[in-house]
Every structure is written in structure tokens, then in C-alpha cells.
Amino acid sequence: MLHRIAERAGTALLVVVLVSLVLGQVLGQPVLLAYVDSGSMEPTIDEGDGFLTMPAVITGPPAEGDVITFRAQEIEGGGLTTHRVVDETAEGYITRGDANPFTDQDGGEPPVTQDRIVATAVQVGGAVITVPGLGSAIELVQGGLVAAVSAIVGATGLDVAVSPGSVGTWVFGLGLVLFVLSFQPSGGEELPRDTSRQTDGDRIDGRVVAVALLILVLVPANAAMVLPSGETTIAVDGSEVAETEGVAPGDPVDAEFDAQNNGLITLLLIFEPADEDVTVDPATPGIPSGEQATATVTVPAPEPDVEREIVVSEYRYLVVLPESVLVSLHEIHPLAALGAINLLIGGGFVGFVGGLIGFGEVRMRDTSRDLPLRVRLKQWLR
């Protein structure tokens, strides 16, 4: 009995870990585990090592000595970076890789503000909990996912290239197909069951699996959309503008800011300025995986000695629907767009469950009892 309980607990833990890894990479938002792909944190975290994380919304503001994952603006062109907090200033946190001789801010990275921190590494006794070699495994999973979806799409005869940025959309779409098929009648009479057989073996309930999968998928999916969203404040100094030849107070002046997509699914960003005399171009950029967009804010030049703060609200949506549809839903209310995305994602993954095992109880017979491990592996690989 204890052996069976331990086996089930280990299996459940493995599933949670694998799902967390894949979702974290797909959504660009660390979910329980993350990894580094450089040696800047050696010897604390070696290149390719994974480490246990907690979302920043749970851990709160970091302290000096904490290892954080944040959205860098300048380091390697922007993106997620994992470094240690070495100091705190009024502008934000000062960070440095353990193997680096200088801080990130000495290299041009702005002080890290709380809204750019996405996770904190879990430390026990001052040591980060690491998983050696995890990064390589994650990259293999990513490549395998793209290859699998490409094979399925190719089998349908569609001449469409599948990239990491679009693979999520294809997964959701395939899930919806299975969801629909799971409700179709079998088209034939039900085969008689041999009720005299022994009913030993484990049972799983498809409804429980569906609910668990929804939680594992929708929580990080919404975190990837909601947590990076918020307000961007841009300061326009009237004195600096006055030094520009040919620009008088009231004339239009431009300022730029960048937005990064660190996930594997294309994002739609919607920028909304707080003031009516401010415009943003582009107002609804789509950002593919691993890329960034530069938006230009146009505002009337303030008077000399006047500094005006421009506030731009940013909304992020996973592109699992046409962008025009997402924009229309957003205009109704941001929750309408989020609700539609959750419905589509939830339906896709629930469809996998319904198409594979149904929504009732399924008995899983243990056909490998008392067999050596190598024999079980051969049976599984056949």
C-alpha cells in the first residue's frame, strides 16, 4: 500500500514538474521552475541548470542577496534575466550575476523596478535549489513540441509553417477538434462487456483530470497576460524640448518605449494613453515570440521648466484568436477579451482529455506488475 501511494505521489509530482516547465517556456512566465542559459550566475547556478522559483506576486519585494528573474531592458537586447540583488536605491534594485565583475547597472541596465520582477529563486540556508542540466531538457521539449505539431499539420496537407511563436495556437486548435469529436456518437452498437473480470486496477476520473489540467494551464496563462500588463510612465521635460531647434510649446514631440515578448506564443498588446491629447503608434502591435516592439508616444511639448508625465496603460493578450476579434472584445471590456481567451484555451485542453479518455471513470489495469523495469520500457516503447 505504501509503495503504491509513493508511486502515485511521485507520478503526480513528475506531471506537475513537466507541465510547469513546458507552460513556463510557452508563456514566458516562470512556473515553479526556470533555468539559465549562460554562465553569469556560476558557481551558484551553472549554465543549463534549472532552479526552483516562486512568483513575485507571492514572495513580494526581494531583499539584498535574493536571486530574482526579471524582465531586462538592455541585457542581451532585453528578455528574462536571472541575477542577484546586491543593493537597493530609490530608482530600483541593483543586480549582478555572481560571475560578473560589475553590476548590470554599470553595463547600462536601468535599476530593476518591482513591476519587472517575475519570480524569486527559492533558497535554503542561502543556497539556491538547482536541478543540474534541466535547461537542455527543456529545449528538447520545445523542439519536440514544434516538430510534433509540424508533423500533424503537415499530415493534413496544409502548407503552413509552424514556429515556436504559433505552436500554442495550433495546440489549442487541435484540442478543440478533439473536444468536438469526443461528443460524437460511436456510430455502432456498444460491445458487450465481460463483467465477470476482476476489476482491480486504478481508476481515473476524466472530469478530475480536466479540472486539474485547467488549473495548471489557465493560472500561468492568465499570469502571462495580467502580470506584465500595467502602466508605463514617460517623462517629457519642457526644458529639454525647448533646446530643440524649431520646436515651440504645444508642438508635437515624440518619445519611445519598448515592449518585450519572452514567451513562445505571439502576444497582442493594446496601448491606451490616459490623456486625450496623447497618441501611441502603433496602438495595437502584435509581437511574435522572443521579439520586441517599439511604440512612439506623441504629445504636445510642455512649457519650459515644466515636466509632464505621460501614462500609457498596457494590456496583453495571447493571440489564440484573430487580432481584430481581440481588439473588438477589448473595446467592450478587457475582461471580455480575457474571458474569450480562457474559454478557447480551456476548451482546447479539456478537448484533449475528452478525446483521449472521456469524462467518466476509466479503469487503468496494471499489466506490468512483477515485470523487470527493462521489460516495461520495451513494452512502452513498442
Image (cartoon, grey):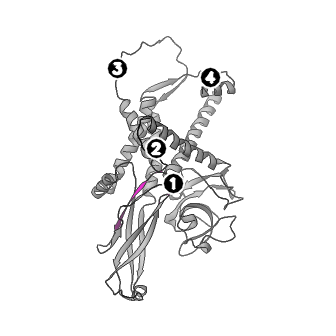
Q: Position of residue 309 (x, y in %)?
A: 39, 77
Q: Look at discs 3 and 4 and give the one toward the viewer.
A: 3
Distance Cα–Cα, label 2 vs label 4: 31 Å
Vertical side of 271 occupied by 174: above or below: above
Mark 1 residue type: Gln
Split into 4 quadrants, where in the image is the C terminus?
A: top right
Q: Residues within 10 Å of mark 3 (few under 14, many from 20)?
A: few
Which is closer to the viewer, label 3 or label 2?
3
Q: Bounds of the magenta span? A: 260-272
Rendering quarter of residue 366: top right
Q: Could you tell which of marks 3 and 1 lies nearer the N-terminus? A: 1
Q: Position of residue 306 (x, y in %)?
A: 38, 86
Instruction: Look at the numbered disc 3 and give the secondary structure of its residue.
Output: loop
Q: Which residue is mark 2?
A: 215
The amino acid pointed to by label 2 is Ile
The residue that mark 4 highlights is 368
Q: Is residue 123 rendered to the left or right of residue 158?
A: right
The kind of residue on which mark 3 rests is Gly
Upstream in the sequence, badge 3 or badge 4?
Answer: 3
Q: Which residue shows up at 46% across the image and 48% down it? A: 219
Q: What type is the residue that disc 4 sits on?
A: Ser
Q: Earlier in the sequence, mark 1 or mark 4?
A: 1
Residue at point 47% right, 39% down? Answer: 212
On residue 187, which mark appears?
Answer: 3
The residue mark sitting in front, 1 or 2, is: 1
Which of the labelled discs sits on residue 29, or is there none? 1
- Observer-nearest of 146 and 116: 146
Packing grade of label 4 (10 A; few <14, some 14-19, many >=20) is few
Sequence-wise first label, 3 or 2: 3
In this view, 360 is above or below 289? above
> Which of disc 2 and disc 1 is earlier in sequence?
1
